[in-house]
Image: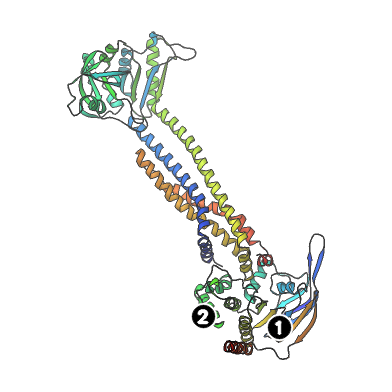
Amino acid sequence: MIKINNLVKVYQSEKIAVTALKGITFSVPARSFISIMGPSGSGKSTLMNIIGCLDRPTSGQYILDGLDVSSLDNKELARVRNKKIGFVFQTFNLLPRLTCLRNVELPMIYAGVPQKERKTRALLALERVGLGDRVNHRPNEISGGQKQRVAIARALVNEPAIILADEPTGNLDTKSGEEVMAIFQDLNREGVTIVLVTHEKEIADHSNRIIQFRDGLLVQDGGVESPLDARDMLARLTRDEEVSNYEY
Amino acid sequence: MNIKESIIVALEGVWVNKMRSALTMLGIIIGVAAVIAVVAIGQGGQAAVMTSLEKIGTNLFMVYARSNDSNTVTTADLITVQDVEVIRNSTTAIKYISPVQNRTIPLKHGKQNKRANTYGIWPDYKYIRNIEMEKGRFITEADEKAGRRVVVIDSELAQHFFGHQDPLLKQIDLLGISVTVIGVTKSDKNFIMGPNQTPNAYVPFSAFTSAIRWNYVGYIEASAVSKEATDTAIEQTKRILHHRHRNADKYNANSLLKEMEQANQIMAILQLIVGSIAGISLFVGGIGVMNIMLVSVTERTREIGIRKALGAQYRDIMIQFLIEAVVICLIGGAIGTFLGVGGSLIVAKIANWPPLVSPLTIMVAFIFSAAIGIFFGIYPANKAAKLDPIEALRYE
């Protein structure tokens, strides 16, 4: 699904050149659930932007779903973002003045999907993340976890090749975070490729594979032996909650 | 993304920022209303002036003796009744003609006293000026020939002197001479002269000159057989006068046609000046739109970043913001048109003009406000559409 070959990114300012990625090679097969980890300054965000087709590499090759996107122009990149990538952000990035339904419809508006079909598909996507009863709410009327689920519905509504999630649990409490991870795991089981960027080991352990970055280089790439199951975690959390309520 | 979607998105944008949109619109509203009102009031006023001038008759002209730099007028040059008679009998281009003497003098009835524009004229004057009678009759040839001491007054004078009594055959004192009222004309008030105009009275020329003890003609008033014949009629009149007085270049003519042209020109200039001032206010309104759109773009940087991440292209963002600007301008333009039309109708009603709001004016105002939206919207919209999605997403 993703093939990255000797990817280099240099940020050229007036006086100095900063090399954020120093030649990275890896690939992500379809139906994977992969985590990208690394401290800030490791080149993680730069890689995210390139994988998300928001930015172009200075050199090297990036093949997404069989298409070489390393040298596309802005217009073509916008089209690739629209059709092949679903973004999930740490800060949700929903449009505050639109209802959940309209937010989920957005990518389809830019894809030119007719209005009727758009509504049907948006409703389906919202049901899939368990928010079928919140379609006409605005983002400020729902909880953080629910916001992130709306964002996931928006990310998957155009049936993208990959879902790219940047610290999706960063602004959520543990329980909402596990709920979001449960949705990712469900989607992955249904065949969606997920690329997750995080700095929390516990969150990364929900995926099948972890790639570690440091100083613009890939330093570690390995499978997760027994990934955490978010549903188990949720069950445990609920049980703990009940116990503490009882004691109280 | 199609246009319909863009319009919906733009309307959402306008609706969410109601107060700000309304204030921005205000500039456009005032500008458009001002332009429409100025044009409509100008056109209405012009039409009103023209109708009232045309009512008098476009064939009308006046000829009088006048001194200029190289010439002085002596009594030998002054026009006489005999001149007018010769002109009447020997020209072909003149339909009606009358010598005129006029004085603003006090008329008296009993203890009442009223200043009036009093004209010594021939019966033709009625047709030259389209004077309409309310009561009795106008001066006749017989009155003139016999030098009868009769007077025709306008309804205002009649009201002043006689109230509800019948004014006919009542006596009025004119410079110590008693004259008999034989007719009452409709008071011809029109807005050009304004209110409180001096009332009019008409006396046979012969009787009037003997009353004022001055036998010469003040000026000749005549109407040509047609509008086109006016110049010929003027030429013929002047030639006869010059021939009979053995002089040259002593007489001058004014024709209504010429005056209408002048009035038209002056009004066109006035309209242009006031119109440009109104246009400036519309321009300032447009700058207001640009200002607000720039603020809006900065404020919504993150929104733009999100939209771009979700696949919006340059074109989509450009159209979204452009349509937002155009929508603000069009709504403002519609309200402004409404106010401008309403305002000019009220003015027309008060001033008693024909209401003149042409569909063309409205169309132009509308197209113009859309054009302002596009013109002042392009810069902010381009700024929005060019934003780098990564920077925009990072914007707090």
Question: Do we see residue A160 in this rendering?
Answer: yes
Q: Left of A29 or right of it: where is B81?
A: left
Does residue A17 lie above or below B375 as drawn? below
Query: What amino acid is labelled 1 in the image?
Result: Ala
Spot occupied by residue A132 in the image (x, y as percentages of width and height): 51, 80
Question: Do we see residue A69 in this rendering?
Answer: no
The number of numbered discs placed on residues in the rendered structure image is: 2
The chain to which mark 2 is attached is: A
Decide which of A167, A175 is in the foreground and name it: A175
Q: Which mark is residue A204?
A: 1
Give the residue at x 23% y 16%. Answer: B173
Could you tell me how far apart the alpha carbons at marks 2 and 1 are, in whole angstroms? 28 Å
User: Where, by quadrant of the figure, is residue B123 drawn?
Assistant: top left
Spot occupied by residue B244 in the image (x, y as percentages of width and height): 37, 11
Does residue B357 lie above or below B326 as drawn? above
Q: Which residue is mark 2?
A: A132
The chain to which mark 1 is attached is: A
Front position among marks 2 and 1: 1
Spot occupied by residue B245 in the image (x, y as percentages of width and height): 38, 10
Q: Left of A193 or right of it: where is B36?
A: left
